Amino acid sequence: MESKYSGYMGRVVMYDLSTQTLTDYPWSDRERELFIGGKTMASKIMLDNFTGQEKPFSEENLIVITTGPLTGTGAPSSSRFNISTLSPQTLITTSSNCGGRFGWYLKKAGFDALILKGKCPEHSWLEINNDKFVMHNADDLWGLKTGETQEALQEKHKMPNGKLMKYGQLAIGPAGENQVLYASVISDERASGRGGVGAVFGWKNLKAITVRGNKTVPVKDPEKTKQWIIKWDKYIKSHPLTGNQLPRLGTAGLVSSMQMRGMLSSKNYNYGKYEHFDKVNGETLAEDFNIVNKGCLTCPMKCARTVEVNGKPVKGPELETLGLLGGGILNPNLADILKWNYEIDELGMDTISASSTLAYAMEANEKGLWKNGLEFGKTDNISQIWDDVAHRRGIGAELADGSKRLSEKYGGKEFAIHSKGMELAAYEPRRAVGQGLGYAVSNRGGCHLNGGYLVIVEGLGLYTNPLTHHAKADFTMLFQNLMETISASGQCLFTSYAFFPGFLITRPNGVITTIANKAIPFIGGVLRLINRVSPALALHLPVFHHTKIFSYALGMPMTFGKYIRTGERSYNVERLVNSKFGVNASWDTLPKRLTDTPQDPNNPKTKVPLETLKKTYYKARGWDQNGLPTKHTLRKLGLGEYC
């Protein structure tokens, strides 16, 4: 259905893998206004198609690949695309966001979203060229690693003169083929990693997708869009986080800050500091191993590191990988982490879940619950372990199911560090209790980003009291709402880092920064009021460039208040999908190590006061005591039909 708005290609399609038939999926401009695109669009599609009886490994499960309206417009960091499906890891919805080129080429082929249902009757890969969909046999690709698969696809996309066609690609590795529950999908070197989307691809016999096209993404006002992007890029490059820390050290630059604040998980979250952190931090990575910085299409930050593994330049590790494969398993060898990061990506697995599951297994072995031979600090056999997990061999077959299922079999639920079945990121929440709340209420499980990333005000940007529960629920809600709309737009969440005025970061002891840090715990009620009356906030914030680009590039009026309300709608739609599969307040949990055991035995406040935080959070969101949206909330958000 064509759109009056620019930025959209105006077409959403559903492709049946079983019958190889293509149909248009209706999507109106009203839906574009309410649900924007990306993960929000995918959630609405799943809400309308799932009954609650579907299983992740079934023909009824959908894979929804969506772009954002800003993808292809040149807006900063706008090359993102999203893959949503029912997660075999959590058994509820998951959304996995990714950079690379695939989303941009999907729009050049003329599509805002691609919905896949059914199951390929044989090992297959899908080729999309504008309106033409062709399914190919993939027996020659099956068993290949992600890099090998993508190299083989390049050979298949060479023209008679030997030149390579321009296209985007997705591929799974052996982990996806063998349904490792946290298998990922890889696009170039970027990972759509969390929730096991790669396992769903594997179950559906879908090894890869390539897409190309010759269409142009329309822009409403090219000149105003261009000038706003120039201004926005300049702001991003001048900000201390997006213009200095991320380009200079990448996300790895947070390791040292987390160590200082007691937020760096160590020995499977037993502690918040690691004595050898300086051997695996961003500074050491930059000085001793980094070759060059890279970035996704239209990204002014270039936060990705390039390192050398076995004489080959490859993508370097992010913060999560450094933290969880460093202090998380008591490993001080950064060269090993670089190698393992590459091996995990090549096998097609999520590094966060793979690392945390390994740490659980080491502690279970240490406590005598599961004699598996894995030990903290013993790393000589780890590469073999990754290969065994991806191929489900030996103990790898059990590690492939994640820490939740292992703890249900062997015990140790209190130190299986997950929420809803998804392992947590490297931020230790007993020194950042707002982040702890975010992990618990996150719609896709233990995700630091879907959880609101409150560590940015609890020590990694600002430094408000990280142990108080005051205002943390309200900030979590606000940040979740903002980040939902950023994702739906097709932009990287790192663009939100510049939301805080730069002087608050560069002058941590300044008068204004000190006042801000002290005031934050007392403005929860104000934030709740802002959320309640958000449509009335018909304004644009100088530090938040995201709103005006909607008018310039899309021709869709957007204010800061409407932006918040759009994100709120997104978060509630995702919760509604999950509620069909049984999610309620009882699912919003953390392991007892984080809620019952203080990180500092001498400070009883160094644990997450989860029940107190949840109660306030539900009230702020307009959810009932069971953690579900009330009828009033749904009607307010234009979702009355789902009451």
Image (cartoon, rainbow, N blue to C red):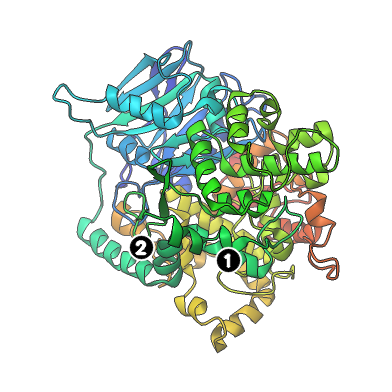
Q: Nearer the viewer, residue 154 or 486?
A: 154
Q: Which residue, as the protein is rendered here, is positioned at the far left?
A: 161
Instruction: Please give left or right for residue 193 compared with residue 124 in the image.
Output: right
Judge whether residue 530 can be spotted in this image.
Answer: no
- Label 1 environment density (alpha carbons within 10 Å; few <14, some 14–19, many ≥20): some
What amino acid type should be assigned to the residue bearing mark 2? Answer: Lys
Q: Where is residue 43? Give x, y as percent.
A: 54, 39
Q: Residue at x 48, y 10 (%)?
A: 121
Q: Nearer the viewer, residue 336 or 494?
A: 336
The residue mark sitting in front, 1 or 2, is 1
Q: Which residue is mark 1?
A: 256
Of residues 23 and 354, which is closer to you in this image?
354
Q: Is residue 320 visible?
A: yes
Task: Give the position of the C terminus as an image quadrant.
Answer: top right
Crowdedness near tag 2: few (<14), some (14–19) or many (≥20) residues, C-alpha within 10 Å: many
Q: Position of residue 316 (x, y in %)?
A: 46, 49
Tell me residue 487's x, y (percent).
Answer: 47, 50
Q: Name which residue type carries label 1.
A: Ser
Q: Quadrant of the N terminus?
A: top left
Residue labelled with disc 2: 548
Considering only order in the chain, which callout, 2 or 1, is on the residue closer to the N terminus? 1
Write down the quadrant of residue 578 in the picture.
Answer: top right
Residue drawn at the location 68% of the way across and 44% of the way down? 378
